[in-house]
């Protein structure tokens, strides 16, 4: 297992954007040295594993769920964490890997277009 200090990791993208990672605006980052997969939001109690160990362990049904609310508060919190499983990359992601972005609303879309020519799409379902 690769030893990586958590403070040296940077948020990249939600796992819910995989397996179509190119359409998520990120390309080839899973092959970079030291990339880590988490099973929940990295700020929560979760595991950190290298890509080859972590990806097969993910529960795709829970990650891709379009509805994560539950009457049980703790179950809902768990589902929200799983929905935000992450890919973490040490150091930084070079601009050549970024091909686009998803945003939550028109305001974010307009702001993004003012600073970038990359593809951008409103996808509210990724944000809560």
Image (cartoon, rainbow, N blue to C red):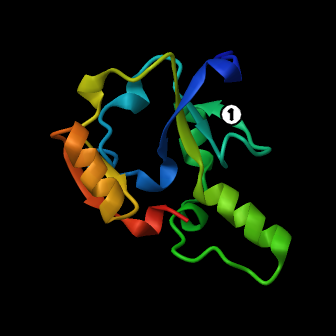
Q: Quadrant of residue 110?
A: bottom left
* Local SS, label 1: strand
Q: Is residue 42 left or right of residue 12?
A: right
Viewer-side residue, 105 vs 23: 105
The furthest residue to the bottom: 71
Reading the image, the residue beneath label 1 is: 48
The answer, for residue 86, to whether it is visible in the render is yes
Q: Which quadrant of the structure image shows residue 114?
A: top left
Does residue 1 show up?
Answer: no
At 26% from the left and 58% from the top, the residue drawn is 121
Up-down relation of residue 80 to residue 101 (above or below): below
Identify which residue is drawn at 35% across, 55% down. 108
Residue 17 percent location from the top left of the image? 41, 53
**Residue 34 image offset from top left, x and y in percent:** 53, 19
From the viewer's perspective, is 32 left or right of 69? Answer: left
CA neighbours of label 1 inside 10 A, class few (<14), some (14 to 19), many (20+)? many
């Amino acid at each position: 297992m690769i030893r990586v200090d958590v403070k040296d990791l940077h948020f990249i993208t939600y796992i819910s954007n995989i397996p179509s990672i190119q359409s998520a605006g990120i390309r080839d980052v899973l092959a970079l040295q030291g990339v880590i997969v988490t099973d929940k939001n990295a700020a929560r109690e979760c595991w950190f594993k290298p890509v080859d160990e972590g990806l097969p362990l993910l529960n795709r049904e829970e990650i891709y769920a379009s509805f994560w609310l539950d009457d049980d508060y703790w179950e809902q919190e768990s589902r929200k964490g799983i929905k935000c499983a992450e890919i973490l990359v040490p150091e930084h992601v070079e601009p050549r890997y970024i091909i686009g972005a998803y945003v939550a609303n028109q305001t974010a879309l307009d702001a993004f277009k003012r600073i970038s020519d990359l593809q951008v799409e409103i996808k509210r379902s990724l944000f809560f």
